[in-house]
Amino acid sequence: EAGVAQSPRYKIIEKRQSVAFWCNPISGHATLYWYQQILGQGPKLLIQFQNNGVVDDSQLPKDRFSAERLKGVDSTLKIQPAKLEDSAVYLCASSLGFEGRPQHFGDGTRLSIL
Amino acid sequence: KQEVTQIPAALSVPEGENLVLNCSFTDSAIYNLQWFRQDPGKGLTSLLLIQSSQREQTSGRLNASLDKSSGRSTLYIAASQPGDSATYLCAVVSGNTGKLIFGQGTTLQVKP
């Protein structure tokens, strides 16, 4: 079974620029999560989708972050404009459902803001 | 608000030693608890998932226990190997949306 695919693996941008990340979940997984992991910390949930609907985006900085999951499969996460504190690894995860199901993670996108 | 704490932040042991990683959480109303492994530059690999009704789970040399009433979980690694060197993360699901709340992790180094 193919795992969760993310691209790009690395991205370096200057502050105030925009950036987008892409995630392709495991086939058939209805639930998709985006997490932010700052160096030395555990991941923090940014947004959760069930199919193409948003379940939880309470910790998404909506003034600069946006995410979509068109057709309930692939998802993109965008930051515009980026700030220095956005430097982190952005992890995508998927699961069959969100009731007691394990989440499977991609390798993440490492974002550096100059 | 659920908070997850892992102690110690870092641990270094000689190869072959048995070791225990600790995880504590503030709200005992959890659906399940997961232990993950993270290698440098990689995503998270799920090691063990314990449902709220279970007390422990085992996989090979790994054994995870859960005590909801005290808000604690332990990950026991038997006969540690250099290949076990990684960061180990504990996470709980405490709401009905499946959101994982993570601890900050324990970075383990097993020396040959």
Image: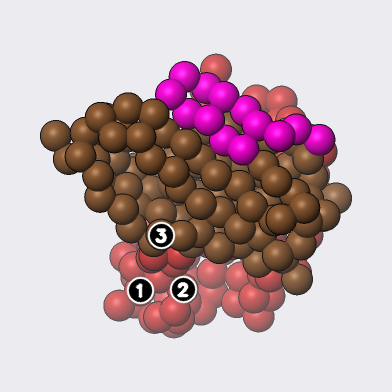
Q: Dot 2, crowdedness within 10 Å: few (<14), some or many (≥20)?
A: some
Q: For the magenta stretch, what is the residue range?
A: B53-65
Q: Is residue A38 left or right of residue A94?
A: left
Residue A102, x across and y down, in percent: 66, 34
Q: Quadrant of the C terminus of chain A?
A: bottom left
- What amino acid is at disc 2? Asp
Determine contact: label 3, label 2, CB under 8 Å.
Answer: no
Of A11 and B2, nearer the camera is B2
Q: Both on one chain, marks 3 and 1? A: no
Tag 3 subunit: B
Q: Quadrant of the N terminus of chain A?
A: top right
Q: Which residue occupies 35% across, 35% down?
A: B18
Give the spatial CA distance, label 3 vs label 2.
27 Å
Q: Which mark is residue A113?
A: 1
- Residue at label 3? B8
Q: Nearer the viewer, mark 3 or mark 2?
A: 3
- What amino acid is at disc 3? Pro
Which chain is the one coloured brown?
Answer: B
Q: Colour of chain A?
A: red
- Residue at label 2? A86
